[in-house]
Amino acid sequence: MRRVVLSAVALVLFVAPTLVACSSDTDDTATAGGETVTVEHSYGTTTIEGTPERIVATSSQWLDALVELGVQPIAYYSAGSYGDERGLYPWQTDVSPDAVALSAAAETSVPVEEVAALEPDLILGAWQIASQNDYDTISAVSPTIGPLGDTGVDRWDEQVRVLGEVLGRTDDAERIIADRNAEIEAVANA
């Protein structure tokens, strides 16, 4: 019995972050339809006007959130040798072949020049933004949402919720969160 419980817990711990994305509590204010959204994060606030179309995901968790909402990034954090030939995990196969895998430098920091050359209108930041200076540098390129919390890895449901606000798709985000939580509960109960 103990082995079954441990196996179920291990599966939940593996499946939960891979289903969507990771994040922590935020204080978001938004107007419907992607007009103007202000997101609070660990390095301050970011205001996004309009609905972003050229999005860079600097972590696989943010990439998962984009894919769940059916949004294609222009560039993404590559899983490197942990992923396929494109640096994608098996559950990320829906990422467009036109999306650019960020260089290996993205494993430790956001490759600012590489990202700037892509002319994004939104950068989704994660643990690679390790200081206020890093945030100030990358946010000079384009509006950047820094890490949502101080833990290094944000809760997936909060990342999905924030992205839903930014894209004017809060109902879709809440549906995704409810669906994934039901899947996780079903696995835990099994």
Image (tube, rainbow, N blue to C red):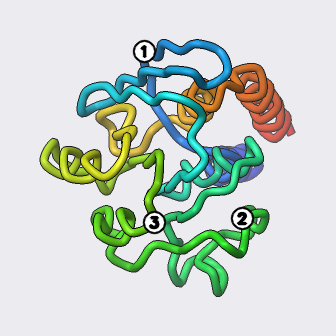
Give the structural element (helix, strand or loop) at label 3.
loop
Q: Position of residue 178 (x, y in %)?
A: 78, 25
Q: Position of residue 138 (x, y in %)?
A: 27, 52
Q: Residue furthest left?
A: 133
Spatial CA distance of label 3 from label 2 is 17 Å
Give the structural element (helix, strand or loop) at label 1.
loop
Q: Position of residue 67 (x, y in %)?
A: 71, 51
Q: Nearer the viewer, mark 3 or mark 2?
A: 3
Give the mark, 1 or 2, whose residue is nearer the N terminus: 1
Give the structural element (helix, strand or loop) at label 2.
loop
Which quarter of the rendering shows the C terminus?
Answer: top right
Q: Is residue 158 visible?
A: yes
Which label sits on residue 95?
2
Front one among 121 and 93: 121
Amino acid type for the residue under numbered disc 2? Val
Residue that badge 3 annotates: 118
Q: Is residue 2 visible?
A: no
Total label count? Answer: 3
Amino acid type for the residue under numbered disc 1? Asp
Q: Cβ–Cβ below 8 Å for labels 3 and 2?
A: no
Give the mark, 3 or 2, whose residue is nearer the N terminus: 2
Residue that badge 1 annotates: 27
